[in-house]
Image (cartoon, rainbow, N blue to C red):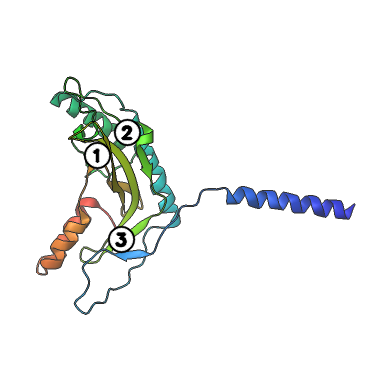
């Protein structure tokens, strides 16, 4: 009888472990230095500010962002008024879900239309977007800011033919001083270019602190 109970317990334990292993894992990498290399060839190590939980939240927000885009599949952006109206609706819904940073905005949507001459419509099916699964955290030393990146592939219509073109980019996240994870930039969005700001601070040593303060205050980020 005891042997039967032990065997049952072992099977139950194996089943439980198997279920836990089925849970999707959010991958991450070490913090990379996004600044220019120091003159002596050395880079200072930076500590991560994005926790494992932050990465899970970032992945969820990236997925919700794609779902939001798909809701606008087939919408007309033929006229400038249509384009502006759709961008305004996208912004409102993204703000309601707290997906994107307040200083980030939607770009002109024509990159994602069907190139029709009479009535351009958005092509935003879910199968045209593919998120990666490995995060990369970038530290910009000269503005003292961290950024989290998640690869994304997406398909658009070619400007010169009827063929589809696959493009690669990143969904870029920042962490606010309140600990909130927000999308700073992604396909269809325009957000602050932290790499460019860091480069400006690198070359402008005299105004470096001012540039750093400007970035942190404008974005309210860590």
**Which image quadrant for residue 156?**
top left
Mark nearer the N terminus (3 vs 1) = 3
User: Relative to 112, is 4 above or below?
Assistant: below
Pointer 2 residue: 69
Pointer 1 residue: 188
User: Relative to 219, is 43 above or below?
Assistant: below
x then y, percent, for residue 19: 62, 47
Label 1: element kind = loop
Pointer 3 residue: 138
x then y, percent, for residue 107: 19, 38
**Which image quadrant for residue 77?**
top left
**Which image quadrant for residue 49?**
bottom left
Label 3: element kind = strand
**Which residue is depicted at the point 20% across and 28% down?**
115
Q: How far apart in space, not on screen, are marks 3 and 2 (Cα)?
A: 26 Å
Q: Are marks 2 and 1 in contact (CB under 8 Å)?
A: yes
- Camera-side residue: 136 or 96? 136
**Which residue is depicted at the point 21% across and 47% down?**
191
User: Relative to 182, is 215 above or below?
Assistant: below
**How dense is the environment of label 3, judged by Cα within 10 Å: few (below 14), some, or many (20 and up)?**
many
Q: Residue furthest right?
A: 1
Mark nearer the N terminus (3 vs 2) = 2
Q: Would residue 77 appear left or right of 136 to someone viewing this image?
A: left
**How dense is the environment of label 2, judged by Cα within 10 Å: few (below 14), some, or many (20 and up)?**
some
Q: How far apart in space, not on screen, are marks 2 and 1 (Cα)?
A: 9 Å
Q: Would residue 184 appear left or right of 206 to someone viewing this image?
A: right
Mark nearer the N terminus (2 vs 1) = 2
User: Relative to 155, is 192 above or below?
Assistant: below
| Label tally | 3
Q: Would residue 208 appear left or right of 175 to someone viewing this image?
A: left
Q: How far apart in space, not on screen, are marks 3 and 1 (Cα)?
A: 22 Å
Label 2: element kind = helix
């Amino acid at each position: 009888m005891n042997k039967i109970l032990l065997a049952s317990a072992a099977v139950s334990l194996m089943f439980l472990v198997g279920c836990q292993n089925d849970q999707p894992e959010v991958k991450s990498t070490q913090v990379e230095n996004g600044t220019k290399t120091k003159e002596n060839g050395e880079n200072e190590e930076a500590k991560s500010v994005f926790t494992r939980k932050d990465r899970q939240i970032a992945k969820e927000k990236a997925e919700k962002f794609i779902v939001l885009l798909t809701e606008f599949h087939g919408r007309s952006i033929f006229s400038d008024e249509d384009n502006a109206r759709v961008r305004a609706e996208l912004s409102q819904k993204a703000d309601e879900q707290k997906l994107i940073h307040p200083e980030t905005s939607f770009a002109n949507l024509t990159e994602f239309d069907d190139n029709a001459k009479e009535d351009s419509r958005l092509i935003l099916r879910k199968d045209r977007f593919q998120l990666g699964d490995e995060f990369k955290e970038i530290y910009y030393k000269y503005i003292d800011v961290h950024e989290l990146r998640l690869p994304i592939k997406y398909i658009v219509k070619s400007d010169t033919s009827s063929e589809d073109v696959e493009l690669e980019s990143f969904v870029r996240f920042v962490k606010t001083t309140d600990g909130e994870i927000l999308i700073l930039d992604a396909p269809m969005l325009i957000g602050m270019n932290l790499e460019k700001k860091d480069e400006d601070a690198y070359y402008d040593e005299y105004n470096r602190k001012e540039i750093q303060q400007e970035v942190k205050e404008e974005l309210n980020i860590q």
